[in-house]
Each structure stands twice: as structure tokens, then as C-alpha cells.
């Protein structure tokens, strides 16, 4: 009789304990849910107005800007890119990019966006699918640009394909984006050859200089951009490359992009630079630091002979009648044109990387 | 054609000819080995240093490649001076170059040696 009583009390205590544990767990879950809601609200509030990002069911929806372009809407585009990254890092919900509102998409913007989506998917992965999802754009020209440049393939999304004719894009040939973990000169040379196949009149020197310039840009990206400890530890350095050729205008644009720490953070600044900039502009902006790196051959190594990559990149522009080199890095932008004063420009939002951008207009009499 | 056959060497007082496009690679690469194949570091260690040990005069033919980056040239030639394998003022007494396709490459090499 006594033994049965003891057994019952033990069982009773066990049941009671498990009930208590279950109740505690429920309580903890409730608190966590409440906390998450507050966190998402505050993150969205701090990042951008709620009409751009909002939570729907189990995902956060982010509206892409109507114009995604570095030339006409850089500030808003960078804040959109930063919002994607911040949301992925701060929240545990997947994000959904709404492309329906996009009416214009620049090639360089598409390249940066593809790299960001690729990185975010690596940074956070979910059991049930990708951390970044989205819909296809509605505007035909945007859909066509993204499809032709290989945007969908690069982020492992089914390419919807696009057969309709777009009046503005008839003369444009897109060389699909590629990513590099190492400098493979043979692949780079094949890329440049494909790009220049529409310019049969180009001399051997032009081709060699282009190869050298792309080679330098990718080498710099992989060597310097990821040398110091960045914000995203564990991700392999990657450099992205793409090009657009406009046959009618005899013009081509080549872009190299990396998501490293940016040129301004790698340039050692001397006191004389600080003082001269304090006297002229009042502060040393990112664009001024890019100019220092570009024109004074100064880089993070501080060793003799280093920092010459920009010279190779500029030499290709110098050999052409009409061309320009633009370097976007973090908040700064630097424009170099032959025989002209370099132009500097800064934004409040950082792009979180470096984009080297050549636009060359090639006439037959060049070289 | 084998790589060594492009390194035409004779007695120590004769000129050794190195044609980069065939003795090394038609696609010169980045600065360091760790960055990718056919680097400037690789050219220096596998071809230039042995050539420097074997000859007093070295003639380098830079034509016939896909194109050079400044850092490749800097690591290959400027690196020789930085590593004290040759003195700065002796460099152009030992090395002579040919670059008919793009003469700007010669400026790069000169700059690299002077800044090393």
C-alpha cells in the first residue's frame, strides 16, 4: 500500500514538473515573439520609411526603388542595398524584394544587386529556402536587361527569358556577369576578347591594355579589398565582372565590383593630406581618399612599388579619344577623364564595396 | 616548343634571351602566386632568378602576350631589386627589354626599379 502511494507521488511530481516546464517554454516563446515584433518595427523604422519595407506573414518585403541607377539615383539605390543587408543580418525572417515598381535598371546597379543578393544568401540560409526572394520586374526593359546580363542565373533564379524587342536595347550587347575568386588571366582575356569582338579595328595595344586593366582591377579587389578584417567574416573574396557593348555608338562599358572594405579604408593618410583637405574642403571625404589612392600611388601596403594598379587602369582610358574611368567606393565617387580635372562626389549612404567602371568610345583612328 | 628552349643561353658573358610569351605564358597574371596562375612572383622565381645566376646580360622580349598589369611587372622586375638580388644601378646594365607592341610597359619597369 505504502509502495503504491510513493509511486503515485513520484509520478504526480514528474507530471507537475513537465507541466511547469511546458508553461515556462510557452511563456518564453510569447516573450520572444513580442520582442521580435518590436525589433522588426524598430529596424524598419531606423532603416527607412515603412512604405519601402514591411512585414507580411513570415517575410519582410522590401520595395526596390523605381529607378535603380548609379548615375541618376545613387543615394536611394545604395540605401536600398544597405537595407537588404541590414535586414538580413538583424532579423531572422527572410526578405522578399518587390521588383514590380522598378522602371529603370542600370547595368552597374544590376551587378551590385546581384552581388548583394548572392552575399546575403550566403550570410543567412533557411531550411525552407533562400533568405532573399523576390518577384520578376513588370517593366519589359528592366526584365530584358536583367535577363541579358545574367542577373537571374547569377543568383540561381530561373531566367524568365525575354524575346520582345526593346527599342533602346537593340544595339546593345550584354556580356554576362562573371565572378572570380582568383585572378585567371585566360578567362579575363576571353571576356575582353568577347567584349572587343565588336571593335575589329582595335589594335593589339588596345587589347593588351584592356586585359592589363581588368587584370589589375580584379587583382586589387581580391588582394586589398579583403585584406583587412571586414564586417562579414567567413565569406570568400569575390570580384564581379560584366560589360555592355553598344555597337551603334561604338562604345563599351566594363565594370569590376567587389564587396570589400573599400579604397578609403585602405589608404594611409599622411598629415599633409589631412591639412590640405582641411584647408580646402574642411574634411577628408571618401572621394578625396580615392583620388589620393588613384593619383599618388598610395595603398595599404605602404611598400615601394605598390599602388600602381590605377595607373594601368587609367592608361587604357588615356589611349582613347573619348573615355572615362569612374571609381565608386564606399561613400565616394571619383571620375577620371583624359586631359581633364578629376571630379569628386560623395553620398551619405555607403555602397559597401568598390566599383571600377570604364566607359570607352572607340573610333577607328584610335591607337 | 618547350619552355626551356625559349631561354637561349650561352657562356656567362653572352646575352640570354627570355621571351615571356613562350618561355613563361601568353597570359601574364597577377602580382603574387596566391592570387592566381602566371604571377609576377612566379616569373621572378622560376625564370628571372635562375637567368640572373647564369648570365651577365639578359634580354627580355615582352611582345606576344595578352597584356601586362603594372603589378605583375613590378613584382617580377622591381622585386629583384627589393629582394637584393640585383642592385638598382646595375639593373639596366644586366637587363635590356624589347616591347614594340606597347612601349608604356618599359616606363612601368623603369618606374618599378627606381621606386624599389
Image (cartoon, helix red, strand yellow):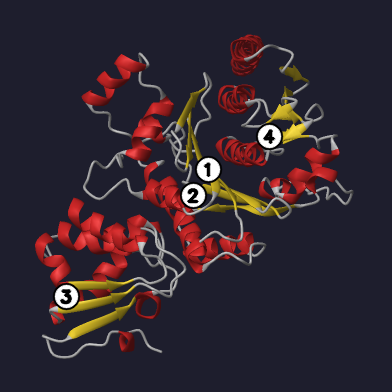
* Disc nearest the viewer among 3 and 4: 3
Q: Which of A83 and B48 is in front in this view?
A: B48
Residue of label 2? A317
Subunit bearing disc 4: A
- Circles 2 and 1: CB distance less than 8 Å? yes
The image quarter containing residue B4 is bottom left
The image quarter containing residue A97 is top right
Residue of label 3? B52
- Circles 3 and 2: CB distance less than 8 Å? no
Q: Distance between the residues labelled 3 and 1?
A: 41 Å
Q: Is residue A209 left or right of residue A244?
A: left
From the top left corner, tell me how far across and down residue A190 is, in percent: 57, 65
Helix, strand, or loop for circle 1?
strand
Q: Which of marks 4 and 1 is nearer the N terminus?
A: 4
Residue at the image position 40 percent from the left and 33 percent from the top = A290
Helix, strand, or loop for circle 4?
strand
Residue of label 1? A324
Subunit bearing disc 1: A
Q: How far apart are marks 2 and 1 (CA)?
A: 6 Å
Q: How crowded is mark 4: few (under 14 residues within 10 Å), some or many (20 or more)?
A: many
- Circles 3 and 1: CB distance less than 8 Å? no
Residue of label 4? A132
Labels 4 and 2 in the same subunit: yes
Q: In this view, does A21 lie above or below B71?
A: above
The image quarter containing residue B95 is bottom left
Amino acid at each position: 500500500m505504502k509502495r503504491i502511494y510513493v509511486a503515485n507521488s513520484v509520478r504526480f511530481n514528474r507530471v507537475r514538473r513537465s507541466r511547469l516546464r511546458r508553461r515556462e517554454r510557452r511563456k518564453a516563446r510569447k516573450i520572444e515573439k513580442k520582442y521580435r515584433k518590436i525589433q522588426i518595427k524598430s529596424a524598419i523604422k531606423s532603416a527607412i520609411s515603412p512604405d519601402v519595407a514591411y512585414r507580411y506573414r513570415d517575410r519582410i518585403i522590401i520595395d526596390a526603388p523605381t529607378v535603380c541607377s548609379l548615375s541618376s539615383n545613387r543615394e536611394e539605390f545604395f540605401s536600398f542595398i544597405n537595407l537588404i543587408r541590414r535586414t538580413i543580418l538583424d532579423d531572422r525572417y527572410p526578405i522578399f524584394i518587390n521588383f514590380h515598381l522598378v522602371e529603370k535598371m542600370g547595368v552597374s546597379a544590376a551587378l551590385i544587386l546581384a552581388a548583394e543578393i548572392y552575399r546575403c544568401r550566403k550570410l543567412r540560409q533557411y531550411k525552407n529556402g533562400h533568405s532573399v526572394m523576390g518577384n520578376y520586374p513588370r517593366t519589359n526593359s528592366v526584365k530584358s536587361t536583367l535577363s541579358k546580363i545574367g542577373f537571374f542565373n547569377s543568383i540561381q533564379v530561373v531566367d524568365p527569358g525575354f524575346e520582345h524587342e526593346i527599342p533602346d536595347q537593340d544595339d546593345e550587347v550584354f556580356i554576362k556577369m562573371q565572378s572570380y575568386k582568383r585572378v585567371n588571366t585566360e578567362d579575363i582575356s576571353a571576356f575582353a576578347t568577347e567584349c572587343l569582338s565588336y571593335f575589329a579595328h582595335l589594335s593589339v595595344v588596345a587589347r593588351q591594355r584592356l586585359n592589363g586593366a581588368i587584370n589589375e582591377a580584379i587583382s586589387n579587389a581580391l588582394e586589398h579589398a579583403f585584406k583587412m578584417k571586414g564586417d562579414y567574416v567567413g565569406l570568400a573574396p569575390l570580384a564581379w565582372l560584366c560589360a555592355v557593348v553598344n555597337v551603334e555608338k561604338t562604345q563599351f562599358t566594363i565594370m569590376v565590383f567587389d564587396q570589400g572594405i573599400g579604397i578609403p579604408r585602405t589608404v594611409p593618410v599622411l598629415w599633409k593630406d589631412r591639412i590640405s583637405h582641411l584647408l580646402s574642403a574642411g574634411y577628408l571625404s571618401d572621394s578625396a581618399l580615392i583620388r589620393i589612392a588613384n593619383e599618388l600611388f598610395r595603398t595599404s601596403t605602404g611598400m615601394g612599388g605598390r599602388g600602381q594598379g590605377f595607373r594601368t587602369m587609367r592608361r587604357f582610358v588615356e589611349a582613347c579619344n573619348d573615355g572615362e574611368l569612374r571609381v565608386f567606393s564606399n561613400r565616394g565617387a571619383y571620375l577620371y577623364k583624359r586631359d581633364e580635372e578629376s571630379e569628386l562626389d560623395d553620398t551619405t549612404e555607403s555602397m559597401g564595396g568598390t566599383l571600377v567602371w570604364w566607359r570607352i568610345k572607340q573610333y577607328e583612328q584610335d591607337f | 616548343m618547350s619552355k626551356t628552349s625559349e631561354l637561349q643561353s650561352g657562356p656567362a658573358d653572352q646575352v640570354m634571351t627570355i621571351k615571356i610569351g613562350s618561355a613563361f605564358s601568353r597570359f601574364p597574371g597577377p602580382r603574387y602566386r596566391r592570387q592566381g596562375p602566371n604571377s609576377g612572383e612566379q616569373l621572378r622565381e622560376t625564370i628571372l632568378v635562375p637567368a640572373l645566376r647564369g648570365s651577365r646580360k639578359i634580354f627580355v622580349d615582352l611582345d606576344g602576350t595578352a597584356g601586362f598589369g603594372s603589378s605583375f611587372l613590378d613584382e617580377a622586375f622591381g622585386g629583384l631589386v627589393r629582394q637584393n638580388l640585383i642592385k638598382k644601378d646595375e639593373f639596366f646594365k644586366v637587363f635590356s627589354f624589347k616591347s614594340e607592341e606597347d612601349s608604356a610597359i618599359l616606363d612601368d619597369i623603369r618606374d618599378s626599379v627606381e621606386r624599389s
